[in-house]
Amino acid sequence: MAGVQGLKVCALHNIINLYFSFTQLKLLFLYKTKKEIYLEQKRRTDRQAHRNSENPCRRTTTDQQNLSQRMTAPR
């Protein structure tokens, strides 16, 4: 009888350990997913900032149009 009760306790401990292991894995997965999302957003903003700083003198289309109008305007 004691052997059967020991098996029941052992099985209960195994179930509890599996549950907590699964919970820890789920939390770790959520943490990694959030971290990956954060890093991807950071990469995008860094890329955009790099593009903007590559050529700070880059003219917009309206600047180019104004410049071409001034160059072709009669003096």
Image (cartoon, helix red, strand yellow):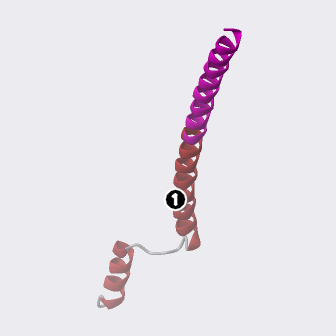
Task: Give the quadrant of residue 67.
Answer: bottom left
Residue 75 seen by the camera: no
Please tell me whether residue 14 is drawn above or below residue 36 in the rendered image.
Answer: above
Residue occupying image coordinates x 65% and y 11%: 5
Task: Give the quadrant of residue 55.
Answer: bottom right
Task: Give the quadrant of residue 2.
Answer: top right
Give the percent coordinates (x, y) of residue 59: 44, 75
Please tell me whether residue 47 is drawn above or below residue 71 in the rendered image.
Answer: above
**Along the horizontal axis of the image, is 44 left or right of 66?**
right
Please tell me whether residue 27 is drawn above or below residue 43 in the rendered image.
Answer: above
Assign the C terminus to one quadrant of the image: bottom left
Nearest the camera: 64 or 34? 34
Magenta span has 35? no
Q: Which residue has dot 1 on it? A: 44
Give the percent coordinates (x, y) of residue 25: 60, 37
Q: Residues within 10 Å of mark 1 (few under 14, many from 20)?
A: few
Check the image and name the residue furthest to the top: 1
The amino acid beneath tag 1 is: Arg
Assign the N terminus to one quadrant of the image: top right
Find the magenta span and give its range: 1-29
Nearest the camera: 26 or 33? 26
Nearest the camera: 71 or 32? 32
